[in-house]
Amino acid sequence: MSKKRNIFKRAVRAAAITTAKVALRPREAPLPPREEIRKVLVVKLWAIGEYLMATPAFAALRQLFPRAEVTLLAGTAAAPLAAAAPAFDRVWTVPEELFVKRRVGKLRRLRKRLGREKFDLAVIFHHAWEFSAFAAWTDIPNRVGLDRDGDGFAHTVKVLRLKRRHQVEEYFDLARACGASGDPGPLTVVSGEEAEAEAEHFSREPPFADSAPVLVAPGGGVNPKTRMEAKRWPAERYVKLVNILKADYNVALVGGPSDAALNADVAAATGVADLTGKTSLPALYLLFKKAKAFIGNDSAPMHLAAAAGTPTVAFFGPTDPKVNGPWHTPTLILTHETDCHPCYEDGYFPDCDHRRCLTAITASGAASLIYDFLDSLDAGC
């Protein structure tokens, strides 16, 4: 994103927040006793990786309100992972474009639907000011949410953002604000019977029928809100890396529908199996549990692999592994330290004509570190 566009977007955001503050007149207030909260709305629309990093907080909220009805407002991308989640009694799916493109008419209809439910509490897992304003607009009396530089102005309970804090911890702070204690556990996915049958089918076929594969995801960085291909290690390096690794390991490619073209090119150049877009997210999670390791960028597949407990090799460039790195799984972070790394902040990438944080990592150098990492795991078995 150019510097001029960055400044313009920040100015628009500041003006919108000021206007909304005047219109909504929000007031902070403590939460009522826990037993008085009968209906809870959890809002987490994007992205898949963020949904996964919120799962420890979801579990804590379920424990806090065991007798309440807990509803998740989810986007279409993450909804398949939420379908069987025990943290929620109901999952309402809405297209992310309602908030991304601010579809006012559809937002009004959603507001009416939420208003009819008479929720006692909303927990907002988003930084953007639009979600704070929307939650207040629904007249839900108690609203717990993140406050990044004033973005959470309409929440009745604000959770201040701390710099360079892991996203899992930050989301868990929302549960703490509702009364939870302790530390966040691992990321969780409940797959469901359909996904189990799907994964069982794939496990009987190559590449899983041969030996536990190393699953590689060269893509990522695309979600309903933004495209962040700048997070990707170069595709030609993945080709060289896969060609090195396939001499010793069973290697296959994975990813989502937006990665199909990229992964097809890598598959054609390496001859390895390509599972991109061929499985549901819950089934891919189960396949990760059968894999030897995962290699990829800061992406949804990386977090899904971490949820499965799969040893994870992750390339990090503009984004910060201390904030978005794999959680609770054996991990190797590959990045080239520079004075400007990490540079991504609050949805913005500064102008960059080199990306040395990623481009300085060679395929042979990465392969050497990956072999050492995998050998150390084997030695620990």
Image (tube, helix red, strand yellow):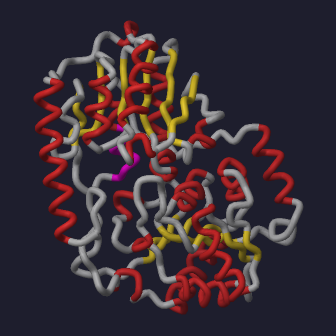
Q: Position of residue 296 (x, y in %)?
A: 55, 71
* Left or right of 23, for residue 288: right
Q: Nearer the viewer, residue 344 or 169?
A: 344
Question: In the figure, residue 378 lies in which quadrant?
Answer: bottom right
* Left or right of 107, for residue 14: left
Q: Position of residue 338 (x, y in %)?
A: 27, 81
The span picked out in magenta is 166-172
* Left or right of 135, for residue 293: right
Q: Main secondary structure of the magenta part?
A: helix
Q: Nearer the viewer, residue 110 or 215?
A: 110
The answer to whether one can see residue 181 in this image is: no
Q: Nearer the viewer, residue 37 or 41?
A: 41
- Residue for point 63% across, 62% down: 257
In the image, residue 70 sits, relative to residue 331, either above or below, namely above
- 199 in the magenta segment: no
Residue occupying the far top of the picture: 36
The answer to whether one can see residue 329 in this image is: yes
In the image, residue 24 sits, relative to residue 192, either above or below, namely above
Q: Position of residue 326 (x, y in %)?
A: 48, 59
The N terminus: image quadrant: bottom left
